[in-house]
Image: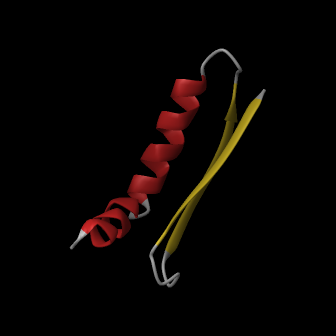
Amino acid sequence: MLYLSAAVTSLDGATQVNGAGSGPLDDPEKLGACIAADLLAQGAAGILAAIRKP
């Protein structure tokens, strides 16, 4: 079993979204994609967009 946890945090630390999950060792891409989708659903895209602004 493969376990993965991830977080996206604003630069000031005020906003953070977290995701975690587990899946079979032979399909790590699926686990990563599922956790990424969860982070995006929680608002990770907005946090990342704010970080990328000049």
Residue at 70% in and 22% down: 24
Q: Is residue 38 left or right of residue 24?
A: left
- The relative height of residue 18 versus residue 1 in the rendered view (above or below) is below
User: In the rendered image, which quarter contains the N terminus?
Assistant: top right
User: In the rendered image, which quarter contains the C terminus?
Assistant: bottom left
Q: Position of residue 42 (x, y in %)?
A: 44, 62
Q: Nearer the viewer, residue 28 or 51?
A: 51
- The relative height of residue 32 versus residue 35 in the rendered view (above or below) is above
- The relative height of residue 40 versus residue 1 in the rendered view (above or below) is below
Q: Position of residue 17 (x, y in %)?
A: 52, 66
List the single residue furthest toward the front. 54
Q: Is residue 15 left or right of residue 25?
A: left
- The relative height of residue 27 versus residue 40 in the rendered view (above or below) is above
Q: Position of residue 12 (x, y in %)?
A: 47, 84
List the single residue furthest toward the right. 1
Residue at 58% in and 32% down: 31
Residue at 45% in and 75% down: 10
Residue 41, by quadrant, is bottom left
List the single residue furthest toward the top. 26
Q: Nearer the viewer, residue 48 or 41?
A: 48
Q: Position of residue 40 (x, y in %)?
A: 39, 54
